[in-house]
Image (cartoon, rainbow, N blue to C red):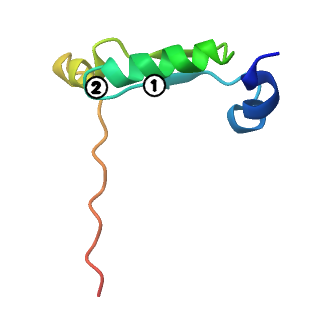
Amino acid sequence: SDVCSSDLKPIFGEGKRFILYCASAWRSALATKTLQDMGLPHVGHLEGGFSAWKQANLPVAEKPSKSPKS
């Protein structure tokens, strides 16, 4: 039996799909391959990474800045 079916199912949930990303797609590609090898069926990564996403002028939401503590 694979690890994902017994140990990771409660974490990743049944029927969920996951898209991993990083700046250039190198780390997300490795993480995707690792999760697939562990038996997680619905996982992929963003080809070209987040940098390619922004360069293609696709929508990006800016993270709100933290307000200074009083």
Q: Do the residues labelled 1 and 2 touch (CB within 8 Å)?
A: no
Residue 9 falls left or right of residue 69: right
Q: Distance between the residues labelled 1 and 2?
A: 10 Å
Which residue position holds label 2?
Answer: 50
Dividing the image into 4 quarters, which one contains the N terminus?
A: top right
Res 18 quadrant in image = top right
Instruction: Please state if 1 lies on the left or on the right of 48 as rendered.
Output: right
Q: Which residue is drawn at 45% across and 25% down?
A: 20
Left or right, 64 with reference to 56: right
Q: For the residue carrying disc 1, how many other residues have a C-alpha within 10 Å: few (<14), some (14-19), or many (20+)?
A: some
The label on residue 20 is 1
Q: Residue at x 28, y 14 (%)?
A: 48
Q: Earlier in the sequence, mark 1 or mark 2?
A: 1
Tag 2: amino acid: Phe
Q: Tag 1, which secondary structure?
A: strand
Relative height, residue 10 to residue 36 (above, below):
below
Please tell me in which quadrant of the rendered image residue 2 appears: top right
- Residue 17, by quadrant, is top right
List x then y, in percent, for residue 62.
27, 45
Disc 1 marks a residue whose amino acid type is Leu
Residue drawn at the location 31% of the way across and 40% of the way down: 61
The picture places residue 59, in percent across and down from the top left corner, at 30, 28
Position of residue 27 measured from the top left corner of the image (x, y, whole percent): 36, 24
Q: Is 19 in front, or is 11? A: 11
Number of numbered markers: 2
Report whether 25 appears left or right of 18. Answer: left
Assign the C terminus to one quadrant of the image.
Answer: bottom left
- x, y (%) of residue 28? 40, 23
- Mark carried by residue 39: none
Q: Is mark 2 on a helix, strand or loop?
A: helix
